[in-house]
Image: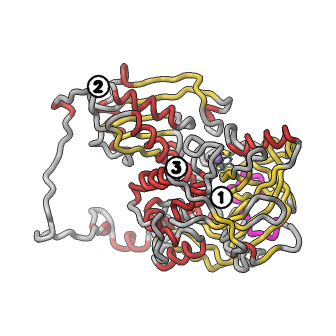
Amino acid sequence: MPKARPNSPARVIADLETIIEALDAQGRLVRIKSEVDPRHDLAGIAARFEGGPRAVLFEKVKGHAHPVFTGLYWSRELLGDLMGKPADSLPHYVLDRIRSWQKEPVDPVVVKTGPVLEVTEREVDLARLPIPEHALGDGGPYLDVAVVIARDPETGVRNASIHRFQVLGKDKLGMLIDPGRHMELYLAKAAKMQVRLPITINIGVGPGLHFAAATPAEAAPADTDELGIASAFHEAPLQLVAGTTSKVEMVANAMYALECELVPGEVALEGPFAEVTGYYAKQAPRPVVRVKKIHRRKNPIFHTILSGVEVFNSVGLLGEANVLNLLRQQVPGVVDVYFSHGGCGFYHAVVSLAQKRPGLGKQAMMAAFAAFPPLKMVTVVDDDVDIRDPGDIEWAKTTRLDPLTGIVLIPKAFGHNLNPGFASGTGTKVGFDCTRPFPFTPEHDRVTFKTVATEGLDIRVPEIRPEAAPGVTAPTAKGGRGKSGGGPLKAM
Ligand SMILES: Cc1cc2nc3c(=O)[nH]c(=O)nc-3n(C[C@H](O)[C@H](O)[C@H](O)COP(=O)(O)O)c2cc1C
Ligand SMILES: [Mn+2]
C-alpha cells in the first residue's frame, strides 16, 4: 500500500476535523453564526443549502456547547474535490478502493488511545448531545449517520454498517435493522446463544469509513472485516481503540463514540422518520439499544445528514460502484452506471452501454437488477447519451425505445420495503431498453457539431437586461418585484 502524504486527500478524509478545515479553506463551508434550534430549525436552514457546493456548520446550537455539521455528502462536486477525484469518476474510484481491499485487505489496528477518549461522560444522558430533530413529522431526534461496529457473536468477525437511531430516553435508542443486514444476522445469533450483543456507535467520521460501512453485503460478505475498506481509502490502517465495556472497538478519531448493547428480543416503538425516499417510514416496534458509556473529543463536532441527496450520494454511490463492477464482469461494453436522483438515488439505475452485439441491452438490464436488489427501474442507453442528464435519457426513451419489445415487466420481485410500491416486500420492477438497434443504421446517428476553439475570436456576450424588455418600466423592474431577496439560498 502506498503511503499517503500528510496533505493528500487520503490523509485529509480520514478525520472529520481536517475535512472541515479543508472545506473552510476552499470556501466550501457555510458558517451559521446565529443560535439555531436543533428541533426543526437546523434542518430547515440546512435544507436551503442542500445539493449546493458547500457544507454547513452550525456554530451555536440552542441548549448545547458543541457545533453541528451537515452537507458532507450532498454534492458530488464537493465530495470529489475533497477526495481529489472528478465528481463523475467517484463510483469508479470507490470501486477501485473496494477491489483493492478485496485483493489485499489492510486490517485496522488497535491503538492505545485516541481523540475520542479525551472525555468520558460521567453520566450517560443522550439529551446532552446536540442531536437534531429534522423533519416536521419525525418521531424525535435521530442519530442518522453513525457508523456501527459489532462482532459476530460466534466468529468474532467485525462488521461495520450505518443505521438510524431514534433517541427514546437518557440511555435508550431505537434502531432500524433492514432485512438482510449483517446486524440482523448477528442479533439472531446472539438470541440463539442467549447473550447480549455489544455494539459501538461512532459519530463524526470521514467518507472513507462511511463508505466502508455502507459497502453492500454483495461486496463485503459477512465473514470479512469491512473496516479494512476504510484503510484502502485512507492509504493507511484505520485506527481503533479498545472498548471499555466489551470487546467491540471504537473509531480512535471519531467525534463521539457510544458503547452500547442490544438485548435480543427487546423492542420499542421507533419512528416515524423522514426517509431517503421522500416519505416517512412508519412507526413500528424495533430493537432497543442501551447506551452504557459516552466518549467524545474535548471539542467535538456533531455530524448529521439530511435524508435525501446525502444518502443518494452515499448508499447510491456504493450501489453504483457495485453494479458497475458486476456489469463489467458480465456484459461486454458496459461503460458507466448512474443511480438517478429522481429515482431516490437507488431505485433507478441508468446504464451506459457501447453495444457489441444485439441483445446486450437486455443482458445489462437483467444483470443490473441482479446486482442490486433495491432497484425498481433500470434504463439502458447507448454511450452517446449522458446518463446524468434526465433530458438526454428522455430523448433516448422517446426516440430509441420500442415500447413493444424494449419494456420488461418483472412482477412480484423482491425489492426495498421503504419504496411504497414494495411495502409488502415484493412489487413490480420495470426495465427500459433504450439502446438503438444493432447493428447500427444511420437513422439513429446523433447530430454532432464541430468543436471549435473560441479563445482567439472576437465574441461579445452582453448582460441580459430584463428592464429593457418591451412593456417593463424602470421603477417596477427595480423595486416592484415581490420576490426580490427571497431567492433560494442554493444559488449562493
Ligand atoms: C446514511 C445512511 C443511513 C442508513 N440507515 C440504515 C438503517 O437505518 N437501517 C439499515 O438497515 N440500513 C441502513 N443503511 C444502509 C446500510 O448501512 C448499508 O446497506 C450497509 O452496507 C449494511 O451493512 P451490512 O452489509 O454489513 O449489513 C443506511 C445507510 C446510510 C448511508
Ligand atoms: Mn457487513
Q: Which residue is mark 3?
A: 102
Q: CA distance from mark 3 to mark 2?
A: 33 Å
Q: Main secondary structure of the magenta part?
A: loop
Q: Is mark 1 within 8 Å of ligand 1?
A: yes
Which residues make up the magenta segment?
A: 126-141
- Per the image, label 1 sits on a secondary structure element best described as strand
Residue 389 seen: yes
Q: Residue at x 75, y 65 (%)?
A: 242
Residue 447 relative to residue 331: left or right: left
Q: Is residue 492 above or below residue 199?
A: below
Q: CA distance from mark 3 to mark 1?
A: 25 Å
Observer-side mark, 3 or 1, equals 3
- Residue 216 pos. (x, y %): 58, 45
How many numbered discs sit on the rendered protein? 3
Q: Amino acid at mark 1?
A: Val
Q: Which residue is mark 1?
A: 145
Residue 27 relative to residue 257: left or right: left
State yes or no: residue 132 in magenta: yes
Q: Residue at x 35, y 30 (%)?
A: 361
Observer-side mark, 1 or 2, equals 2
Q: Residue at x 49, y 68 (%)?
A: 10
Q: Are marks 3 and 1 in contact (CB under 8 Å)?
A: no
Q: Earlier in the sequence, mark 1 or mark 2?
A: 1
Mark seen at residue 358: 2
